[in-house]
Amino acid sequence: MTAKQELFNILDAIGEQLDITPTQFNNAKDRYEAVGKHLAEGEYCLINKKICLKNGEIYPQGSIRLGTTVKPLGLNEFDVDLVFFTPNISTDDIDPTELNRLIGNRLRESETYKKMMEPLKRGWRIIYHDEFYLDITPSIENHTEPYNKSELVPDRKIQNWKSSNPKEYAEIFDATALKSPYFSITKSIIENRASTVSDFPENIPKKPLLKRYVQLFKRHRDVMFENKNHAPISVIITTLAMHSYAYCIANFEYDNEYDLLLAVLDHMPAFIQKENGKYKIMNPTTEHENFAERWNEVPQKKDAFDEWHKEVTKFFNRFHENMGQHRVFEVLEDGFGKKPISNIANQYTANITQRRNIGLLATSALEVPVKSNTFFGKNVL
């Protein structure tokens, strides 16, 4: 392995530390399905109309659906963002505030949920202490965009309905993540060459590269903005990374996963639009959802994104081929925090010691000078 390949293997292992466990995921799934079943059995009368929650569907959105969840700093609970879709209700029947109230009433009919719930601006939260939060946003059918799967959800001020499309967004993100980058022939020859020694196995990424990149970017954001305001929201980081990844792999080849990470990061700002003095990062699945809407109302949020992008780019460019193992983990701790790094550092050191003891290597690849190469790939157009 080259130093950059080994560095990415460490980053991939850090990303795995940031993931929720399969047990946590399954517990969350069981519980949100139980909440959805309870909600879907609710039925109410409102102004001589029967408001029926029956046949309602609850489903995950955001990072839990995309596979980019990052364990929060200093907390045991993680967020599970959910949508409760009510197909029997239209904008003619009810406004967002009233639907939100009815969903809250239905939750209170359960003695269990009654003790665990608290209001959110656009929905409700059910708290499983030391496990997770279930954050529920109501949605209804969107007849204004019948050509897609968009739904209507409460706007930020819960006064009106606005278009959103978490299902198709997740489908597009998954499809983009499954597209494979083209790595140079040099790497393929090295990795596939016959070997007379059974080398220590390389770490195989547990999830598509785009999803791992997003996790790493979000964790750096969390550390940088701990106890600060205006942290860039996850959907902006995710959307820009998705567009950048698709552009990079369509137009360039790379020597390794780390160089691709740097390229994705570098190109993210290119996908921020500005029209008539207003910033736009549109949901690619619906016409009217601008993820950068708040940037136009609170300029400090755009400034915070710019500052984060500058710092995260600087962070990932701090690593170089002659950097010693101890220094690598010191820098990683600066960007990702101490907790996810300590276990990886201990495991890595133990593996290096084992390999040296059985004569598989003389020193860590991270301590060996290797030929430098461009971080931005080679144009293949």
Image: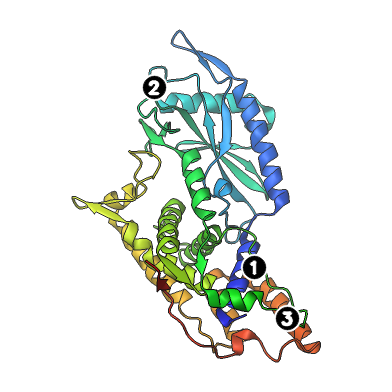
Question: What amino acid is labelled 2 in the image?
Answer: Thr
Question: Can residue 304 be seen in the rendering of this structure?
Answer: no
Of badges 1 and 3, nearer the viewer stands: 3
Q: Which residue is mark 1?
A: 13
Question: What amino acid is labelled 1 in the image?
Answer: Ala
Question: What amino acid is labelled 3 in the image?
Answer: Ser
The picture places residue 212, in percent across and down from the top left corner, at: 56, 61
* Mark 2–mark 1 distance (CA, rounded to whole Å): 47 Å
180 to the left or right of 233: right
* Residue furthest right as drawn: 358
Q: Secondary structure at mark 2?
A: loop
Q: Is residue 204 above or below residue 323?
A: above
Q: Earlier in the sequence, mark 1 or mark 3?
A: 1
The picture places residue 67, in percent across and down from the top left corner, at: 58, 52
Of badges 2 and 3, nearer the viewer stands: 3
Q: Is residue 169 above or below residue 380?
A: above
Q: Which residue is mark 3?
A: 195
Indicate the quadrant containing the N terminus: top left, top right, bottom left or bottom right: bottom right
- Seen at 57% across and 16% down, the residue is 43
Query: In which image quadrant can residue 209 be found?
Result: bottom right
